[in-house]
Image: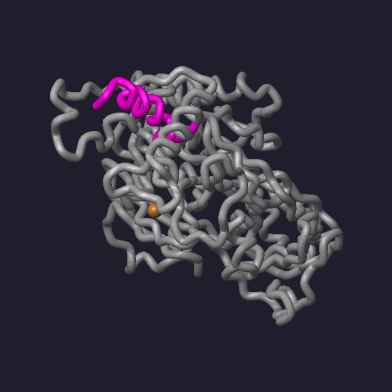
Amino acid sequence: MSGTRRRFFQDAAVLGAGLFGLRETLHAGAPESTFQSPRENENGRHHSPYGSHGPHPAQARAVVRDHTLPMMTPDVADLAHEMDGGVKVFHLVGEPVKRKIAPFKTIDAWGYNGSCPGPTIQVQQGDRVRVVFENRLPESTSLHWHGLELPIEQDGVPYISQKPVAPGEKYVYEFTVHQEGTFFYHAHSAMQEMMGQIGFFVAHPEKDYKPQVDHDYGLILQEWAVLPSNTVPNTAAMEFNWLTFNGVSAPMTTPLLARLGSRVRLRILNLGMDHHPVHLHGHQFVVTGTEGGRAPESTWCPMNTVLVGVAQARVVEFEAKYRGAWMIHCHLPHHMMNSMRDLMRDRQIETADQTEAKAMGQMESLARSVPFEHVHPSPVAANAESVPGFPQDAFMEMGMDEVVEKPETYGLPKNWSAGMMGMMTMIRILPDKEYENILSKKKSASPSAQEEHHHES
Ligand SMILES: [Cu+2]
């Protein structure tokens, strides 16, 4: 390989590795708790959604349910609500969103309330919910409540169950949530879905799931086709070059945290063009729920890879038995990276309208534009260039620990970020002291976070 070509590959490696990212500051309003308790997550716990308004007996019962563990959606905020009598009221705005999916890549997606995926909605089973939806998109849309059993008028399908919501208009959805489980909201228009218009809608059960968990996390799987020098996803494409969890590619994904010995729930939701086999390292899990709600315990069986099909949710639970930083990732090989196929004309990777020189030029200029240092920590053999097939991953493993640094990455081994690309995150299973240390770093990193005091009853 010529010196120029080698340098090109070294620079180009930046494209294969994922992202950096200062943590999106979307967690405002998510109080953290360092209170040591057998049931906790970084959001602390929900207070009763009802306060003193118990409009009917089922909801009145909920008043005493102040220990519901909220799901946490890393890199995506929760949607706050207000109460109107006994109705939980949410305001959702469909709008164009700029989303930084990589340190050097910000895309023009569509989402809700400035976020893509949209903010997470969490309610209690039995809640009466009103969603005041405002359309700030340049075209008509609607909101579909995926998996919820509700009156046809609330189903959100344009022309079938309602008139499309025109740009600038509002539409009010209101229904009672009699189910529990992991649901989602999305635009019921194919291209809008592929522009990112999706979000979690989680209904916490009236009666606690058994066994209880200590941590509850949500991941939304998305894929994007964004050509180089472009910011707008090609929603007609059938092949994708950017793969994200909660709107960011690894190593920009914020690691999940769990206390050693705790029980963890992970809810995984997919709305894209591909099915994703999501794999957890070092542990076995059981599938405890689907997009249809809780699964009977008789169906639980040990596994460590779950196929999350399009329009499906899979809920898995496991005991965090082993200390370490354990990968959680889609196992499709091309989803464990962000593809360079649009840029590189090399061996089997070809595009019809690219010359090699043009592709190299694009990659070099893009690599040079990345505003941070990166390293390629893994050595290559002296005769590498004479081996057919080289390089494969050699220059994709790009360390960029500093640009993706955040409290959740504290203490990871040097160059950890070189091992993370595409649809990947990790769960850091930590003994008490290290776990609490990171929580306190998070707290000082976001001074607005308020401590909540909770007591197990
Ligand atoms: Cu995948």
Q: Which quadrant of the figure has residue 261?
A: top left
Near-viewer residue (87 or 236)? 236
Q: Which quadrant of the figure has residue 413?
A: top left
**Residue appearing at x 67%, y 57% in the figure:** 62
**Residue appearing at x 79%, y 76% in the figure:** 163
Q: Is residue 18 magenta?
A: yes
Q: Give left or right: position of 383 versus 225.
A: left
* Residue 136 percent across, percent down from the top left: 80, 55
Q: Is residue 273 magenta?
A: no
**Residue appearing at x 58%, y 30% in the figure:** 23
Q: Give left or right: position of 104 versus 250.
A: right
Task: Work out whether 70 lies above or below 20.
Answer: below
Near-viewer residue (173 or 134)? 134
Q: Give left or right: position of 163 versus 178.
A: right
Is residue 284 among the parts visible in the rendering? yes
Which span of residues is magenta-colored? 1-19
Tell me how many marks there are: 0
Near-viewer residue (440 or 272)? 272
**Residue appearing at x 72%, y 52% in the figure:** 49
